[in-house]
């Protein structure tokens, strides 16, 4: 029955007033050909200004299965996704981008993978039409997930994916600040598959991911769901201590063998700077964990909703 096959689309929006309507239309056209499903669309304006919000309001007035959320400020893509997922009612939740690069007309492939037994289906791309900078950021994120969160090496994760309701509900159990959706999914289930789709070129605008946002995303991934960075710091500290001990023995032995050998000021300063830098790095990493714990204890919100639209018509 259709009520058992409801699809919820979640679209985090950031300065997408020129592309969002096209994405929504493509979803409508695609779902018209998938008559066994009913669907809803949840659009989250992630603090990108009134232009995008006005487009969302207009789209929500056109059809009742659309719902809009306006966040009070820019909380980041993952927080916007959490806000959108929390307002979904479908048995399957599909998350996709607002710029049209993720092909909404191929959502049937993701739904087929879920129907065949997968808990989560991620779109994978033979070639991504992103800039070299964005592709590099995605590569770093992939390696981070492998090392820190034990992501399978052959699993590709992207911003276009579908997940079962129980996975979405488990993701929503995370109430703290700094949500990291990929980490939440990976800790919920291992029954995850890839589905090949075509990645499109960006027709309008440019990516909202700046270097600062990518660094914040990586730091969030490093510290949100793993203590491996602290263990790596401990291992590096132990290695440096052992190295300094060996070097001290070498220096003493060299002085005993040849008393005329001068004590090297440059070598001493190099050692001080190196070990001092390593100490500060590890203290900073520990401080990041402590700071995030402090913020979570003080109940800092994942996001703040300024306004909603479309809910009263549903």
Image: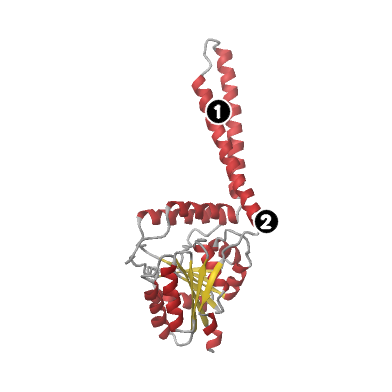
Vertical position of residue 291 compared to residue 103: above or below: above
In which image quadrant can residue 164 be found? bottom right
Query: What's the mark number on residue 36?
Result: none
Vertical position of residue 292 compared to residue 239: above or below: below
- Residue lying furthest bottom: 1
Q: Report the coloring of the rendering.
A: secondary structure
- Residue lying furthest right: 297
- Camera-nearest residue between 93 and 98: 98
Query: What's the mark number on residue 297?
Result: 2
Of circles 2 and 1, the one toward us is 2
Cα distance between the residues tagged 2 and 1: 37 Å
For disc 1, the neighbor class at 10 Å (few under 14, some 14 to 19, many from 20) is few
Residue occupying image coordinates x 59% and y 23%: 248
Residue at which label 1 appears: 272
The reply to whether residue 314 is visible in this rendering is no
Image quarter in which the N terminus is found? bottom right
- Camera-nearest residue between 288 and 61: 61
Helix, strand or loop for disc 1: helix
Count of numbered circles on the image: 2
């Amino acid at each position: 029955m259709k009520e058992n096959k409801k699809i919820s689309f979640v679209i985090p929006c950031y300065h997408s007033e020129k592309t969002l309507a096209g994405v929504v239309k493509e979803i409508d056209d695609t779902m018209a050909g998938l008559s066994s499903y009913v669907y809803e669309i949840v659009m989250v304006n992630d603090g990108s200004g009134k232009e995008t919000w006005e487009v969302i309001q207009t789209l929500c007035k056109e059809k009742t299965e659309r719902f809009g959320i306006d966040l009070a400020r820019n909380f980041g893509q993952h927080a916007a996704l959490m806000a959108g997922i929390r307002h979904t009612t479908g048995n399957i939740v599909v998350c996709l981008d607002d710029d049209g690069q993720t092909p909404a007309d191929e959502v049937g492939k993701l739904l087929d993978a879920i129907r065949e037994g997968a808990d989560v289906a991620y779109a994978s791309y033979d070639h991504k039409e992103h800039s070299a900078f964005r592709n590099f950021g995605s590569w770093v994120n992939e390696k981070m997930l492998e090392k820190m969160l034990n992501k399978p090496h052959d699993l590709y994760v992207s911003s276009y994916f579908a997940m079962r309701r129980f996975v979405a509900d488990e993701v929503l159990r995370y109430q703290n600040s700094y949500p990291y959706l990929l980490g939440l999914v990976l800790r919920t289930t291992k029954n995850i598959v890839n589905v090949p789709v075509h990645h499109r070129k960006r027709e309008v605008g440019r990516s909202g991911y700046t270097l600062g946002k990518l660094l914040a995303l990586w730091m969030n991934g490093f510290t949100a769901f793993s203590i491996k960075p602290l263990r790596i710091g401990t291992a590096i500290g132990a290695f440096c201590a052992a190295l300094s001990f060996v070097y001290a023995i070498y220096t003493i032995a060299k002085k005993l063998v040849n008393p005329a050998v001068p004590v090297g000021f440059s070598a001493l300063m190099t050692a001080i700077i190196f070990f001092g830098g390593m100490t500060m790095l590890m203290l900073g990493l520990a401080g990041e964990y402590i700071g995030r714990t402090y913020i979570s204890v003080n109940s800092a919100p994942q996001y703040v909703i300024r306004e909603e639209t479309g809910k009263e018509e549903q």
